[in-house]
Image (cartoon, coloured by chain):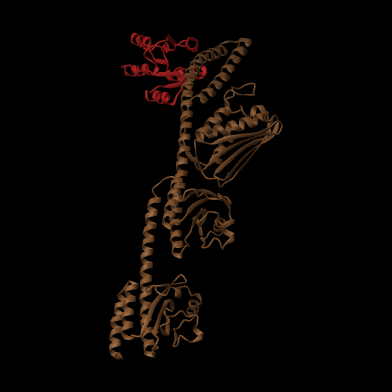
Amino acid sequence: MKKEVKRILIVEDEKTLALTLYEVLFTASGDFEVVVCDKGEDALKKIEEKEFDLLITDLKLPGTVDGLDLIRRVNKMSLKIPTILMTAYGTEEVREEAKKLGVKAYFEKPFSLLEFINKIKEILGVK
Amino acid sequence: MSIPLDFRMQLLLSLSREITGAFDLSKTMRFIKASALTFIPHIVWMNIFEIEEDEFKPIEFLDRENIYKNEKFFSEIKKKREYIYIEDLKDKKYEYFPFSERARSALWIPIKRWDKIEGFLGIESEISKAFKLEDIIFLRILSDFLGVSISNIKLLKENERRKADFEAAYEISLQINKPFKKEEIVKLFLKLLCEKLGSIYTAFFERKGDILYLFDYHTPIEGITPINTQFLIGEGLVGTCALKKETIYVNDINLSKEYVKGIEGIKSEMAVPVLWEQNLIGIIDIGREKEFTRSEVFMTNLLINTFSLSYQNAKYYEELTRYINEMEEIVKEKTRELIKSEKFALIGQMSSVIIHEIKNLLSGISAMSEFILLKSSEEKICETAKIIREEIEKGLKNLSNVLEYVKPLKLDFKKRKIEEVIEKAITLSKGFFEGKDIEIKVEIDKNLPEILLDEDRIKEVFINLISNAAHAIEKRGFIIIRGYKEDNFIIVEVEDNGIGIKKEDIDKIFEPFFTTKPKGVGIGLAIVKKILEYHLWEIGVQSEVGKGTIFKIKIPLKI
């Protein structure tokens, strides 16, 4: 049986982290297809173009659409995409808002890569 | 000529009505004189002498001047409580009696009322005729009527005078309640009292400890100044009054050497204590030429009681005003601090943004180093990646601490037992004791009341203090945490027998970014101080190098 390829969209403007996440996900499993962009607006375009199985976004993003806005917009789409929020500005309010929006996981920067990968595998049902 | 008895009786009856209904002594006297002369036509002289304050005063008929000055005569008749009848004035025994050459006999009858002698009735008969027994009885009855009349009139006068005194006292009390200032009240009262008593001067001495200081004085006469401006308690009339807390008055200063007062014209002096709840506030001193009567002393005391009330009110008002001013100063000071803290908050916001940016950046590097660690099999690279990771973690922890210090605190106050909070802090601090032999002792009074505090923050304070104590102990030592009540405070001490703090460093330890540790940003005690300041608690420190350190937290139970 041919394995299903899971498509992941990463929205992160911090280059080092974006690159690391790309590398770690790409190498963690051959079944992940990873797309990276650094703006909320770009992410929305990419989602319209192609389907994704998971959206990982930073809270603070350049431009007018931040991580929470992006999740809100994605939630309104017909196709439901699970979301993960990362942030260095971890406050109680952000955590609450993420919970309300049904975010699957919330990572406060800096976080452990291992925990991060495991969480993604868990969400996507990949072993 | 003899008047029938029943006629006399009828006349006496109507006379008694007239007399008891009359409130004017001279009118009464006219009735008496008319009645006496009707029945005893051979009366040649008749007069009433009223005793007032031990002196005889003729009520009418100001003839025979000499009689009023004959002291021997008056002392003689004063001794006698019954009437004196001298049938023949030529008798040598009564030589000193002042009588008229035309008189044959004299009759002196005491005018009594409730056994008190109010005066005398003096009567003389013409040379040819002595008084008969029935004349004497009749005149004695008249004198009894007079007794009733005089005492009635006296009572009435006394009542009127008291009423006037009370009215005056009321008026004065109303007036001295108007000013707010102590100085104004004293000035006004001394003036009113001086006017009321017609005195030469009135003065108020304020008590401060054992000394009475002249506060103010009043005199209607130009050029008079008090000689003494200070008295020790017990010294002079003023001091004696203060010592006894009783009114003292002397009616002839010349006779009383003890109380000599140099101001000319003053013959009588009165000192009245101004008391408030049995405490001596001061003395009112009054000097005048005229003697003080008992009722004047009474009224003065009454007025001074009112004065003490107004004075004390003003004092309280003054204290309250001072208190309000102090409070205003504090509010101003706190506002300045607040402005400062707002500026600080701005710095805090800026720092917060910078710190988050750094955190964001570091998180990438941290993830990258972890990625290298996961993927590389080369030992040296892995070692380097590990060091990078560890350093980033340390840096991030320090950044979080700084962030904690710069951002304003939001406290969640709940009533808690300080002992329980400390116990939790100790449990969380166990990690600091690793590799060292540290004994921790807790000596906290079980009966300390619950206090309002933010549990997490106070826990943080004690974790910080315990961690510092543990750091100060090199290998072996102890930490003692004490808690006890002292006056209106709870005192909590954290003591260690570690290396101690250098004298020159003591003043700086609560400043942010001051540290003696090789690793650390020096923010721990600054955070402790900040948290305690938000609680309005105080912290102090005592330390000796080589002996140890005590941190002392003062928690007010009342603010």
The image quadrant that residue B401 belongs to is top right
Q: Residue at x 38, y 51 (%)?
A: B175
> Horizontal and vertical percent for residue A93?
41, 25
The front one of B287 and B299 is B287
> Horizontal and vertical percent for residue B75?
50, 77
Name the side, left or right, on which B127 lies relative to B257: left
Name the side, left or right, on which A87 lies relative to B369: left
The front one of A19 and A104 is A19
Name the side, left or right, on which B21 lies relative to B370: left
> Horizontal and vertical percent for residue B283?
51, 54
Q: Compared with residue B65, is residue B416 higher up or lower down, i.e. above or below? A: above
Q: Is residue B434 visible?
A: no
Q: Quadrant of the N terminus of chain B?
A: bottom left
Q: Compared with residue B532, is residue A63 higher up or lower down, i.e. above or below? A: above
The front one of B529 and B466 is B529
Q: Compared with residue B74, is residue B4 higher up or lower down, i.e. above or below? A: below
> Horizontal and vertical percent for residue A102?
38, 23
Q: Which chain is brown?
A: B
Give the tally of numbered discs.
0
Q: Residue at x 64, y 29 (%)?
A: B506
The front one of B528 and B294 is B294
Q: Which chain is red?
A: A
The image quadrant that residue B448 belongs to is top right
Q: Residue furthest right?
A: B546
Q: Residue at x 44, y 77 (%)?
A: B116
Q: Is residue B172 visible?
A: yes
